[in-house]
Image: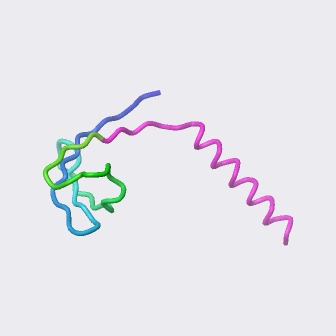
């Protein structure tokens, strides 16, 4: 399963939010600081790892089908 990694620069931290610059193109994203590793601060570098999860997808599809079936049976 392919894995994608990107370098992230923590550009600024303002209260509970942080501004990130992602990858070589420095794409800007704002995230809650609580999503980042504890102790992350302005000027830090992070590695973002992205990986497909067929297991999570199958589980979500199964839960969705189950919920739709329950809703159909109620009406």
**In the current view of this chain or complex, which residue is farthest to the top?**
1
What's drawn in magenta, residue-wise? 48-75
Q: Is residue 38 left or right of residue 13?
A: right
Taking the spot 23% from the left edge, 48% from the top edge, the residue there is 22
Location of the C terminus by quadrant is bottom right
Question: At 29% from the left edge and 67% from the top edge, which residue is drawn?
Answer: 16
Main SS type for the magenta part? helix
Seen in the image, is 41 located left or right of residue 38? left
Q: Residue furthest left?
A: 43
Q: Looking at the image, which residue sits at the far front?
A: 39
**Image spot of residue 24 (x, y percent):** 17, 42
Q: Is residue 52 magenta?
A: yes
Image: 39 above or below 48: below
Q: Is residue 9 magenta?
A: no
48 shown above or below 10: above
- Which of 16/51 is in front? 16
Residue pictured at 19% horizontal, 52% vertical: 10
Q: Quadrant of residue 11?
A: bottom left
At which x and y percent is residue 14? Answer: 20, 67
- The percent position of residue 69, horizontal first and vertical second, equals 80, 58
Q: Position of residue 18 (x, y in %)?
A: 24, 61
């Amino acid at each position: 399963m392919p894995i994608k990694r990107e370098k992230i620069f923590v550009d600024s931290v303002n209260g509970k939010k942080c501004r990130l610059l992602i990858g070589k193109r420095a794409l800007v994203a704002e995230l809650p600081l609580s999503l980042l590793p504890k102790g992350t601060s302005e000027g830090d570098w992070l590695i973002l790892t992205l990986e497909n999860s067929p297991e999570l997808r199958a589980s979500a599809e199964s839960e969705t089908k189950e919920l739709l079936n329950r809703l159909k049976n109620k009406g």
